[in-house]
Amino acid sequence: MSTKNVMVFLEQHKKKIANVSIELICEANRLAATLGGEVEAILIGNGIKEEMSIPAHYGCKKIFYAEDKRLSHFTSIPYAKIIADIIREQKPQIVLFGATTMGRDVAPRVASELKCGLTADCTELKIGDHTIKDKEFKNILLQIRPAFGGNIIATIVSPESFPSMATVRPGVMKLEEANTKLKAQIVPFTHKLKDSDFMTEILEVIDEAKAVNLQAAQIIVSAGMGASDTSALALVKDLAKTLGGEVGSSRPVVDSGVLIKDHQVGQTGVTVRPNLYIACGISGQIQHRAGMAESKRIIAINKDPEAPIFSIAHYGIVGDVNDVIPKMIKAFKAKA
Amino acid sequence: MSLKIIVTVKQVPDTHNVTGDAMKPDGTVNRAALPAIFNPEDLNALEEAISLKNRVGGTVTAITMGPPNAANVLKECLYRGADDCVLISDRKFAGADTLATSYALKCAVEKIGKFDVIFSGRQAIDGDTAQVGPQLAEKLGINQLSNVKQVLDVNKKSITVKRSTEYGHEKIKSNFPVLITVTSEANEPRTPSAKRVMAYKNIQTESSSGGYSESYLTVTDGGTIAAIKEWNVEFINADPIQCGLSGSPTKVKNVQNVVLTTQNMKEISSSVEGITALMNELMDEHIIG
Ligand SMILES: Cc1cc2nc3c(=O)[nH]c(=O)nc-3n(C[C@H](O)[C@H](O)[C@H](O)COP(=O)(O)OP(=O)(O)OC[C@H]3O[C@@H](n4cnc5c(N)ncnc54)[C@H](O)[C@@H]3O)c2cc1C
């Protein structure tokens, strides 16, 4: 039997814990509250004790910490073995990973070792019941994710699997307020790795700065195919600059080479939840909406009154971007 | 040097081009209405396998799990330069999630025998999970290098690759045997060779039930094969309980059509007055400015 605890794998890169891991701590709190369990975490690395106050401030109660010089940078087998061992010992009901290159590398390996269910890229997690024939499973994890290229939303369960594991993309789960008074217990974990487990040799780790950090932006002005020609795109950039925001885009704008991939919002781009999202000439297909529907305010500008983007917008402007954007810039400058 | 290379491929419904009639009225996908295609990133994996073979010598064996017509993707592999291919097909594989799939692939790979490197596409477009590659590596007890965008060096014992991450990239090296998952950035997949299409367009699958000698399993570089091998659960010595639905811990509880959560949208006139009022409202609420 498992406990009712929810465990989060804390991803670290160069001793900094990834934002997505903190988002997952917040989500784990919500799930654990329903289950009546606690939030625990796994951290693997070297010399990162100071960082552990951050997950603690968001409600993580216990951190299992595996420390070793050879673990300072991620490699698949050592990380997977440690995570699997901790899960076997602690028996959490649920384990969450960021759907990052690291999470998507290690989580399947852990799931394979533990023969447990793993659902990738969940957009929503809930606790609920499930029946198979006459067997009822109470308070299990419901894992909700887009499937079939985003054309349907599927709810996945792994009722007979301990634990239930899921990966969640960065920016999907809501960050709560930190409480700096909260503390976590740090439990050192002594790994049983052998030299032969270290099969990957790291020759070089090169960080490349992103051209734009959409996840940190409070205002995003996004260009779709209806605003991708040179003059309309210049207007989008001008509006973003005027409002102090960043430029986002739909996928075809990136595919056509007008903007680089860092700008892409959506299922295969980044997920954002800014205070204000202005969609310029974006039709609002599901794959785009998946990345921005949680924005606090959405303004949609589109020529087509039937465009699906209007169904999730708070403010809809039916019109041509070439006409509307200059008016917005002018109105803002007149008052600011 | 002669490397034994395996590539895993999958036939998938073309989810990137879902048209109206592919959606059933209840919101679920009508798989039958979608054309079946070669999973895009598996083509990148195949390309990586073939170019590695051309660079250092060796053989490429393609494997897929699927229904009988999944043999079509194996033919595509032959057209592009694969030396041999295996279809693992059996009713008992139906309903497999990633864990059951990787188990079946593992049994097939063990049947093939010794290998140096397995290339897999990073993920398949019908599920976008990226799980089968790492799970196959774990089941085989070998190392994995995922999200690889470039193969840098290779020698008799090891391979060095460039792996992309959110933070940038890493240059990493592993001894053989190893499994590598390849992204679409890695290469531009080749098109079929006309000569090979001629040689293989009528190739048939031959079921394993006939029982043939182990020598049948070995291919040599440059030779042509007579048939696509089709292997079932017994032939690959798989435990039926770990295959298909019964070997899958994850179950689909339900699927829903994507419903638009209609907001109380405020319609703003595109006139100067309308837009000025909107911008003023947002400034008053400190959302902008
Ligand atoms: C597996 C998969 C993943 C995907 N991932 C993503 C993703 O991450 N992000 C993403 O964005 N898409 C993604 N897509 C693509 C998505 O389905 C849509 O094709 C895409 O979002 C459409 O982009 P768009 O709205 O810019 O272009 P279009 O659909 O071409 O829409 C252009 C819009 O602009 C309007 N317009 C034209 N001219 C003007 C004008 N002068 N003024 C005002 N309005 C104008 C038109 O009315 C139209 O609504 C994905 C698709 C698949 C299958």
Image (cartoon, coloured by chain):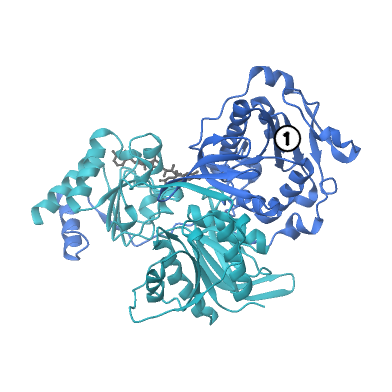
Chain colours: A cyan, B blue
Return the residue nearer the eye: A335 or A184. Answer: A184
In the picture, the quarter occupied by the C terminus of chain B is bottom left
The residue carrying mark 1 is B71
Give the image location of residue B188, x and y in percent: 51, 30
Residue placed most toward the observer, B280 or B43: B43
Q: Quadrant of residue B75?
A: top right
Give the quarter of the image for residue A49.
Answer: bottom left
Q: Where residue B268 sits: x, y (%)? A: 24, 54
The count of marks equals: 1
Q: Is residue A209 visible?
A: yes
Instruction: Identify the subunit bearing mark 1.
Output: B
Question: Does residue B200 sit above or below B10 in this rendering?
Answer: above
Quick one: SS at disc 1? Answer: helix
> In the figure, A272 relative to A83: above or below?
above
Q: Which amino acid does label 1 sit on?
A: Ala
Q: In which quarter of the image is the N terminus of chain B?
A: top right
In this rendering, position of residue B76 left or right of residue A300: right
